Image: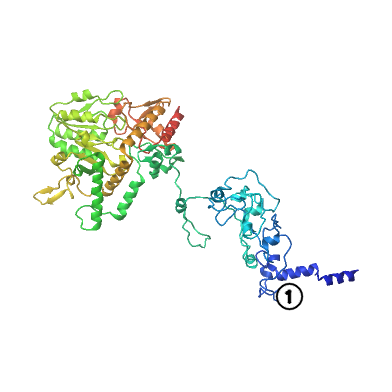
Amino acid sequence: MVNTMTTIESLAGVPEAAEISRLANELFPDLTESIYGVPTADKSADSDTGAGGNAVSSVPQISRPSNAVPDGYGSVETIVPGMSATDYAYPGNGADYTVPDFGATENGLPGYGVPEVNAPGTGLAGTEASNYGTNPASALSAAGSGTAPGASYPGSGAAGRTGSADTFDWEHPFAYGGASSEPWLDSVQGPAAVEAVYLPGTGDIPVVSKETTSYTPVVISQTEAKQNSRKIDAPTSLGGDTADRKKTAPKVYTSRDESIRIGSKTLAQIRSDFPILSEQINGNRLVWLDNGATTQRPKAVIDRLTYYYEHENSNVHRGAHTLAARSTDAYENARDIVRDFIGASSSEEIIFVRGTTEGINLVANAYVKPLLEPGDEIIVSILEHHANIVPWQLVAQETGAVIKVIPCDETGQLILHEYEKLFTKKTKFVAVTHVSNVLGTVTPVAELTAIAHRHGVRILVDGAQSVAHIPVNVSALDFDFFVFSGHKIFAPTGIGVVYGKKELLESARPYHGGGNMIADVTFERTIYNPVPNKFEAGTGSIADAVGLGAALRYLSEIGMPCVYRWEHELLQYAIKEMKTVKGLHLIGTALNKASVLSFSLDGYSDEEVGKRLDSYGIAVRTGHHCAQPVLRRFGYEGSVRPTLALYNSFDDIDALVKVLKTFA
């Protein structure tokens, strides 16, 4: 019996199992030993020599194997429904073959912006195809463990990439880049190098690596891609590449802000223009409600300052070199921008100073002081900041003049008929604020000016708290002098403006002496320059003046009337909401009011309120605000003072009120 079987096997030419194993190891070590090739210990000096020393062909000729994908193409015997493993991995013998792409195409992933091409297996084309597969599957359809879910690709050749909707489950999560319950589908990689050489045409057969990688796809615009682009350095000894990614600033606006238009921009765009609003304070977003003390700076101003220092920095006037010319042009251009912004008739009427305080002192000493004699009168109002009180006190003390004060009513508005009663033949000058920095009262400056002029008296208007909130035209209002600070209108600190009618400036004496303000100097006499240089001794704040010009241009592009309307709406909303806080008392309730929301809170000091607000990222001013006379008029020594500006929002007010209600 044994001899008979041996004879049959010999006649049939069928080798024993051991012989098959030995031949397979010799002919295909890469498939039988390891997907990565024969282990190092088994390699001989000549990779084309088998274990028995016989040379083997680099590209072996083989017969078609069984209907199973060899180990290394999924680590399991993966059967693709509708297609044999022979068709899958071993093309040849004249038969066409198909390699399924499992949802990936040469043009991208289905459901992720695939161009207008035929969607495989859908029967769709064009726009329909590009939109196909964008909805996730409601349920997972799997053909069994180790089986490509829902995959069936009848046909051959190029046609194998298309078919009917029944041949591939395009609603399966994997079809549009989603996760799969099949482990091998979650770790797809390209084939190992050895298999790619021996088996051409199988480059997209999924291969499982012992070290797998999963991906979370992100679809972004070209702009976002440029912003997030990495700078890759050379690998270091510490391992890997180093990447420098730009930090993405948190959004500083809400969807509600996107629907609010203020002139040429939305509130969302305006808030995005101010980088500091993305700052986090004590773990909370910054709510800047201290605009009465200083405003924040838009990117346009910051960039303009940077450009000046990088490309234009030089002292102005008298320079023969290029940078001196650039710097002078930038400086004088800023003067022209100020002229247009406040409606002056000439750039010669614009004088750059450090701020409102210096501006008032300049007018007091250069123009008013020479006019005064003992007993002469200067009129100011009860609403004034100390900067519009103390300079007049100093001048009065030196000259023997006296000061009279315009009273206000219980709402904080000036009483005009009492104002007119103050004028006598001795009255020489009037200095009043446009907007109270404590009450927010908008004073009737047109009437105040007209009354003063009717009595033959000149007037100065302090615009520190108005210029960023209310459109101002000094020519139309017939102001004699108007002063304001740059830092209260989104410009740098250290810069301010004095506007004066040209004939008044020419009649005034110089305030400071030094370089730039002179035309000729000898020890016997000095000839000073005409206005405005007459009042700009020494090197001024050149870059800050340029920054002021950028700030005013920014506001002009939005439109000051639009700024005024928005802030008025925001102020009314804030007053309504703050009145709902138990124990809160608003200070200053004039009908014509702007930007200021001073209050006191029963049972709490101003400092306690300010500190708690700060713990939530809300910045307000506390104290007497350099306006003690008006606070004492209402019975206070200080107050909590939120102040509004262009970039504030309803959400800022809501945040303020929410914290204030925690005191109740």
Q: Nearer the viewer, residue 473 or 395?
A: 473
Task: Measuring from the top left, give residue 285's x and y in whole percent.
Answer: 44, 40
> What colouring style does the render use?
rainbow
Taking the spot 30% from the left edge, 44% from the top edge, the residue there is: 553
Quadrant occupied by the C terminus: top left
Q: Position of residue 617 (x, y in %)?
A: 43, 38
Dot 1, crowdedness within 10 Å: few (<14), some or many (≥20)? few
What residue did someone put label 1 on? 52
SS class, disc 1 = loop
Q: What is the quadrant of residue 565 in the picture?
A: top left
Q: Is residue 186 above or below residue 407?
A: below
Residue 380 visible within the image? no
| Residue occupying image coordinates x 71% and y 76% | 54
Which amino acid, mark 1? Gly
Q: Relative to 429, say whether 231 is above or below.
A: below
Closer-to-camera residue (595/146) = 146
Q: Is residue 111 left or right of residue 621?
A: right
* Pick the front one: 452 or 170: 170
In this picture, residue 134 sits left or right of residue 252: right
Quadrant holding the N terminus? bottom right
